[in-house]
Image (tube, rainbow, N blue to C red):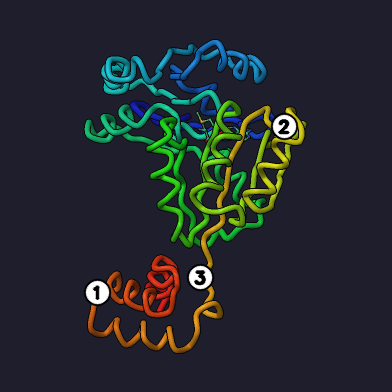
Amino acid sequence: MIESGTLFIVATPIGNLEDITHRALRTLKEVDLVAAEDTRHSQKLLQHYSISTRLISLHDHNEIQRSKQLIEKLNQGERIALISDAGTPLISDPGYGFVNQCRLAGINVVPLPGPCAAITALCAAGLATDKFKFEGFLPVKTMAKQQTLQKLLTETMTTVFYESPRRVVDTIKQTIAELGPQREMVIAKELTKTFETFYSGTAEACLDWLEADVNHQRGEFVLMVAGEKPSQTDVSSEALNLLKLLMNELPLKKAAAVTAEQYGLKKNKLYQLGLDL
Ligand code: SAM
């Protein structure tokens, strides 16, 4: 039997209903209450597994007020599970404020790991996974989106985004504008579902693939942008030596700028090379 007065953060499937753990199902059965983003949506999941636990809504618009009510219940010893529409709660989903308040109130919070679209996409994309950056959804406004993408110019880690089907073409166009057509990317769509697809190629090739067929633009998307690989071979040994020499005397930004000027190279590339050195 599970401990009283505990909040369980329960990951649920992102498509394929078989992707749910034994522990998650047992917990959803045994708790007193399941807090869900959209109760009608989650009711279907519970019904599929013949779980009759009561559902209560917790979404972006009622999180503050609902958290207070649920914390009272937890303090009275009730056991509550938090789920979202799909995947891991709090990952581009509601629940942060609630969990934060529970921790501050000294309530036991127990995570039950399971599906997450970002990790599911990353582990099969064939891009570097030793370090990666998760950006969630890109900003919708053009300027803010540009600024976020510009930061990837010198980013050496793989970056993972969530994107809606309505914006995916525009986002890849902006990626090409900010990072160039040759940056490597992977599009992962409809993960764990019938039409699961991975498409890898340059940003330009990704755009061509999306535009080749409107069906390619439908569904749920995870976009991954490969890290920039500064190759020392593009930079002559003279330039490299100057950079090293200047780095002893100047801040890296300045050293990179002077070397770039001297040898007609890109500042950003030299800056990244300096960091690697
Ligand atoms: N909490 C979820 C998780 O753990 O991945 C993410 C919720 S977020 C509101 C929804 C976004 O996740 C979608 O717009 C899409 O970008 C991504 N996503 C969710 N399920 C997916 C799937 N089956 N295939 C591809 N992307 C998915």
Question: Helix, strand, or loop for circle 3?
Answer: loop
Is residue 6 or residue 154 the one in the foreground? 154
Compared across the picture, whether 5 is left or right of 47 comes to left
Residue tagged 2: 193
Residue 251 numbered tag: 1
What is the quadrant of residue 233 in the picture? Answer: bottom right
Between marks 3 and 1, how big is the CA–CA gap? 19 Å
What is the quadrant of residue 166 in the picture? Answer: top right
Residues marked 1 and 2 touching at CB (< 8 Å): no
Between marks 3 and 2, how big is the CA–CA gap? 36 Å
Going by the numbered disc 2, the residue's amino acid type is Lys
Residue in view at x 57 percent, y 15 percent? 41
Question: Helix, strand, or loop for circle 1?
Answer: loop
The image position of residue 96, as x and y in percent, is: 35, 32
The image position of residue 69, as x and y in percent, is: 29, 15
Pointer 2 residue Cβ closer than 8 Å to ligand 1: yes
Between marks 1 and 2, how big is the CA–CA gap? 50 Å
Residue tagged 3: 230
Within 10 Å of disc 3 (Cα), the crowding (few <14, some 14-19, many 20+) is some
